[in-house]
Amino acid sequence: QKEVEQNSGPLSVPEGAIASLNCTYSDRVSQSFFWYRQYSGKSPELIMSIYSNGDKEDGRFTAQLNKASQYVSLLIRDSQPSDSATYLCAGSSNTGNQFYFGTGTSLTVIP
Amino acid sequence: ETGVTQSPTHLIKTRGQQVTLRCSSQSGHNTVSWYQQALGQGPQFIFQYYREEENGRGNFPPRFSGLQFPNYSSELNVNALELDDSALYLCASSFPSPSSTDTQYFGPGTRLTVL
């Protein structure tokens, strides 16, 4: 099993809808979790970090972490065409000195 | 902008050559991590440097090596280049202690093409 797994998509949602992105992780990943957005040809840009079970909200973005199920998700409310990008889920290792990324989920928001 | 810079932006090499990529971390950051991102894939962790020492390494062969300097800038060296080394190489810096809760901020990357 890969350390961090994502549904590669592609995911398409209409403008104004909620986009839901999901990620699961292995036992080797347990500390901190991050969502990054990556536009084509650009480097990853941090959206949110989450360390504790539950929800964390920042503007239109909500990250959810469930350590018992080893599951992380990102909800994007009121999706905008500018949200169209690849979303990367990442987690740090048990030892804290490695970051593992998923393969990314491609999101397209249709105007 | 994260304040992390990388050079060069693009690079073309031939198989068997050696390459050095450079990274300047964000002010106040003393931890630098390097990643390889192949087309359509997520970044793969190469290694991390903290206070000039290698602090962790991913599943990459020894021909991938690195350095971190007293000003916390860093180099990634790749020897005996192979075609599969063609990728976007990303540098990320993080806050003063390399704990697992530190957020990593990425530079713009170096696109390496091996012919």
Image (cartoon, helix red, strand yellow):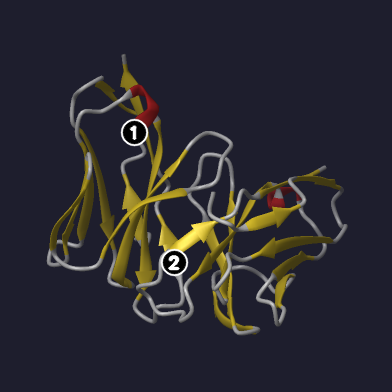
Vertical comparison of B2 with B63: above or below? above
Vertical comparison of B53 with A55: above or below? below
Please rate how many residues cluster around mark 2, counting C-alpha atoms within 10 Å: few if below 14, some from 14 to 19, many from 20. many
Q: Residue at x 45, y 48 (%)?
A: A45
Q: Quadrant of the C terminus of chain B?
A: top right
Instruction: Say what amino acid the circle numbered 2 marks.
Output: Phe
| Label 2: element kind | strand
**Badge 1 or badge 2: first in the primary sequence:** 1
* Residue B56: x %, y % from top left: 53, 79
In this rendering, the count of numbered labels is 2
Q: Is the residue under label 2 in contact with that under label 1 (CB below 8 Å)?
A: no
Vertical comparison of B65 with A24: above or below? below
Q: Residue at x 67, y 70 (%)?
A: B61
Label 1 resides on the chain identified as A
From the viewer's perspective, is A69 left or right of A8?
left
| Label 1: element kind | loop
Label 2 resides on the chain identified as A
Mark 1 vs mark 2: give the one in front.
2
* Residue B85: x %, y % from top left: 70, 53
* Residue B48: x %, y % from top left: 57, 74
Which residue is more in the foreground, A42 or B58? A42
Judging by the rendered image, the residue that carries numbered circle 2 is A99
Q: Residue at x 69, y 62 (%)?
A: B23
Query: Image quadrant of residue A94?
Result: bottom left
Instruction: Say what amino acid the circle numbered 1 marks.
Output: Gly
Judging by the rendered image, the residue that carries numbered circle 1 is A9
* Residue A28: x %, y % from top left: 33, 73
